[in-house]
Amino acid sequence: MLSRAAILSGQTSRALVALSRATGTTAASNAAAAATDSSSSSTALRPVRQEPGKVRFGFVPEEWFQMFHSKTGVTGPYAFAFTVSTYLLSKEIYVLEHEYYSGLSLALIWIVAIKKLGPKLAATLDKQIDNYEKDWNEGRVQEKQVLEEQIADEEKAQWSMEGQNILIQAKRENVGLQLEAAYRERIIAAYQAIKNRLDYQVEIANAETRIAQRNLVEYVVSKVKAAITPDQEKQNINKCISDLALLAKA
């Protein structure tokens, strides 16, 4: 029996090999997908409706006659066809057996059917193709309209977002003005409070000065009155009476 370490090492090696294969396959598939996408995006073209080329006699391409016209003129292709057919018939290379006449009869039937039923069938098929192309173009036009509406909605959303940015800026400026007004109101309030306090101190100082002056005047008056003697007061009274008498005589 194998040891447990050998079994684990074998399982580990197999897991590493599987992982490397998966990684290589994924990388290769991604590279192939990228190459395919790039080649398809570079070579992809919008399908265009192809119109059949011009023919003569129902099956001969117009290019055949144009090739002969540049070298032999207008009758060249007809002369070549007549000469070749005469040569094949005269040398019995092409034998006119019963299958030829059967084929000629079938060709006449086909020509008559094409002339009679061909235009109607062609008109029906062209109508179906036109309807298919109309449906395809209608889907493309509708998708284009949807994309244009989405573009218009996106432009409107961008314009609205610009308006929101302008509104936010206006709100910020309004908030700034409100903050400035509140700041100025607080400055005025602080100024008024300081002025009131200073006026109070001035009033206190003025009141103290008035009280001091009044007390000083009363003190001086009381001291002067106290310094006047009764004799001086009597002399002053007599002096006043004599002055009044002189004034009365005058």
Image (cartoon, helix red, strand yellow):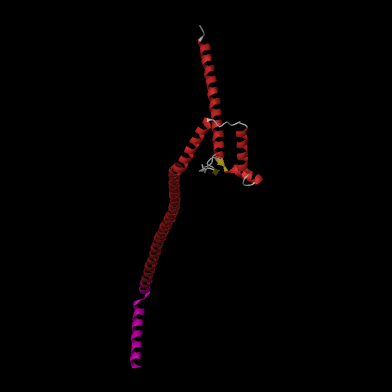
Quarter of the image for residue 81 reads: top right
Q: Nearer the viewer, residue 232 or 2?
A: 2
Q: Is 230 one of the magenta-colored residues?
A: yes
Provide residue 93's location: percent of width, then percent of height: 61, 31
Q: Can residue 125 be seen?
A: no
Provide residue 207's location: percent of width, then percent of height: 37, 66
Provide residue 39's location: percent of width, then percent of height: 56, 36
Q: Nearer the viewer, residue 148 or 195?
A: 148
Q: Nearer the viewer, residue 195 or 5?
A: 5
**Residue furthest front in the image:** 90
167 left or right, relative to 31: left
Quarter of the image for residue 71 reads: top right
Number of numbered discs overlaid on the protein picture: 0
Magenta residues span 222-250
Q: Residue at x 33, y 82 (%)?
A: 237
Compared to residue 8, the image places residue 132 above or below, namely below
Q: Is 203 one of the magenta-colored residues?
A: no
180 left or right, relative to 50: left
Compared to residue 33, the image places residue 168 above or below, namely below
Q: Residue at x 51, y 12 (%)?
A: 7
Provide residue 138's location: percent of width, then percent of height: 43, 46
Q: Main secondary structure of the magenta part?
A: helix
